[in-house]
């Protein structure tokens, strides 16, 4: 694998397989077509089909919400996209060139896919500013890190991120002192400092106050266009705030897709998820 990646990094596109063609340092090709394409993805665990020929397309710059009952396959879908779970069959492409089924989790993250889990994970003994500094996309080798000093451009980037995630006035506070919602914002900011093109967000407003939820919706809407976002969520009010297309999963497949108002009227969705 290391030899193949080295070929891709050196520019030897003909000898490197398509799955590795643009992984190291170049980003994903989004000049045309979707940023994410899943086709007939099937995943089984001990005879249980968590995903059943799942097909899903996410466009460049799109903000998509994924909803559905527990066990519908939402987490397994994100596990496949990030390389945590290998599908039994089917294909998964990031952009036009990156075959996700052939890459490891770190390689997929390097390619430009970032994932946020439901529970926030931040460095609580460090300040908010320091958390963002550590997350910044840069050379993380020990020698470089020990000698590194932030230049004005890097400080400006962090300041802009602090403002964007509503934590500008909390830059010097320890991350452990933040509220649950603020920790969620900080982790989203840390993810954004890595400059991902596709963000996978798992129930990002769980446990937030109404005010924090509204602010988070504003943040996600502002990110759409410059980033592609896939948001797994159960809070229908939050999903409504985000707008855009909604995909309903059930038993590992797409049950319905369209604007929220439309899928809420779908009898199948009412029966298996929303209730009457």
Image (cartoon, rainbow, N blue to C red):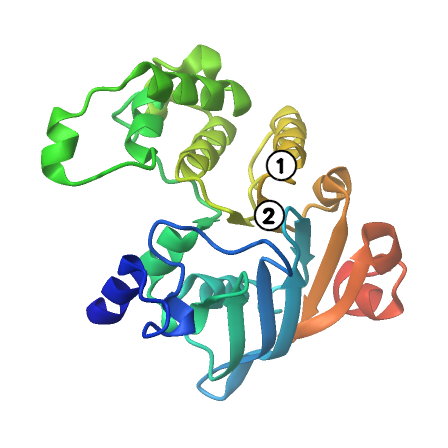
Q: Are marks 1 and 2 in contact (CB under 8 Å)?
A: yes
According to the image, label 1 marks what residue? 220
The residue nearer to you, when weighing 106 against 46, is 106
Q: Residue at x 60, y 76 (%)?
A: 39
Figure quadrant of residue 238: top right
Q: Residue at x 52, y 68 (%)?
A: 93
Where in the figure is residue 147, as x and y percent of width and height? 12, 25
- Residue 230 in view of the camera: yes
Tag shown at residue 111? none
Tag shown at residue 229? 2
Task: Name the quadrant of the N terminus.
Answer: bottom left
Name the secondary structure under disc 1.
helix
Report the number of numbered marks. Answer: 2
Where in the figure is residue 179, as x and y percent of width and height? 46, 25
Say whether residue 15 is left or right of residue 158. left
Q: Residue at x 9, y 35 (%)?
A: 143
Cα–Cα gap, marks 1 and 2: 8 Å
Q: Residue at x 65, y 67 (%)?
A: 56
The residue nearer to you, when weighing 157 against 239, is 157
**Furthest residue to the bottom?**
47
Task: Compare marks 1 and 2 and give the one earlier in the sequence.
Answer: 1
Compared with 212, 78 (above or below) is below
Say whether residue 257 is left or right of residue 83. right
């Amino acid at each position: 694998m290391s030899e193949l990646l080295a070929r891709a990094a050196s520019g030897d596109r003909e000898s490197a397989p398509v799955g590795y063609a643009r992984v190291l340092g170049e980003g994903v090709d989004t000049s045309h077509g979707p940023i994410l394409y899943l086709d007939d993805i099937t995943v089984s665990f001990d005879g249980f089909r968590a995903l059943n020929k799942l097909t899903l397309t996410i466009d460049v710059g799109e903000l998509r919400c994924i909803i559905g009952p527990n066990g519908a396959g939402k987490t397994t879908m994100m596990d496949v996209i990030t390389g945590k779970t290998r599908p039994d069959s089917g294909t998964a492409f990031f952009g036009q060139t990156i075959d996700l089924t052939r890459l490891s989790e770190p390689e997929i993250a390097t390619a430009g896919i970032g994932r946020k889990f439901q529970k926030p994970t931040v460095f609580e003994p460090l300040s908010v500013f320091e958390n963002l500094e550590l997350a910044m996309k840069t050379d993380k080798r020990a020698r470089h890190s020990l000698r590194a000093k932030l230049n004005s451009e890097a400080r400006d980037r962090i300041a802009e991120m602090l403002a964007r995630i509503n934590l500008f006035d909390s830059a010097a506070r320890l991350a452990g002192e933040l509220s649950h919602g603020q920790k969620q914002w900080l982790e989203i900011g840390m993810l954004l400092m890595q400059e991902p093109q596709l963000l996978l967000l798992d129930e990002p407003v769980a446990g937030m106050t109404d005010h924090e939820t509204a602010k988070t919706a504003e943040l996600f809407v502002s990110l759409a266009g410059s980033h592609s976002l896939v948001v797994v969520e159960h809070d229908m009010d939050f999903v409504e705030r985000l707008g855009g297309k909604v995909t309903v999963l059930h038993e590992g497949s797409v049950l319905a897709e369209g604007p929220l108002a439309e899928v809420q009227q779908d009898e199948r969705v009412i029966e298996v998820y929303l209730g009457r």
